[in-house]
Image (cartoon, rainbow, N blue to C red):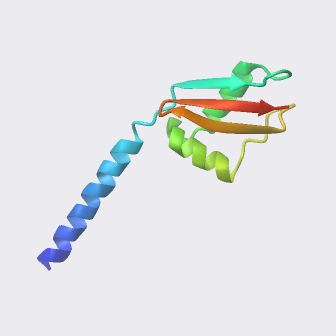
Amino acid sequence: MKKVLVIFLVFLAILGLGALYVSTYTLKEIETEGCVYSSESQIKDEVKKYAYMNNTILLYWRHKFKPIKKIPFVAKLDITFVNKNKIKVKVYE
């Protein structure tokens, strides 16, 4: 019984440390490229609204499975990491 409790506590500790590490990936800066018809501020605002919990990792995964599609004149957005607090958005209009 004690072995199971120790394994469970170790698992919870690893899970907690992982969550703490992921929480350091805060979206602070967005760099845009390719904006012709849409303004950079409009793209940045939509990406910020789309970012779940303002986290770059969660934004990347969410965009990978369900891309942002509601911006006028924008056919597609490519989101790449620059560092853990900055992303680059390439706009295809």
Q: Position of residue 29 (x, y in %)?
A: 55, 24
The single residue placed furthest to the left in the displayed view is 2
* For residue 92, above or below residue 57: above
Q: Where is residue 76, by image quadrant?
A: top right
Q: Position of residue 61 (x, y in %)?
A: 59, 49
Tally of numbered tags: 0
Q: Position of residue 30 (x, y in %)?
A: 60, 25
Q: Position of residue 9 (x, y in %)?
A: 21, 63
Q: Measuring 18% from the left and 71% from the top, which residue is drawn there?
A: 5
Q: Is residue 51 left or right of residue 46?
A: left
Q: Measuring 77% from the left and 19% from the top, which residue is drawn there?
A: 39
Out of 80 and 61, give the one closest to the viewer. Answer: 80
The single residue placed furthest to the bottom in the displayed view is 1
Q: Is residue 82 left or right of residue 33?
A: left
Q: Measuring 83% from the left and 33% from the top, which residue is drawn there?
A: 74
* For residue 7, above or below residue 35: below
Quadrant showing the N terminus: bottom left
Quadrant showing the C terminus: top right
Q: Measuring 72% from the left and 31% from the top, which residue is drawn there?
A: 90
Q: Where is residue 38, by image quadrant?
A: top right
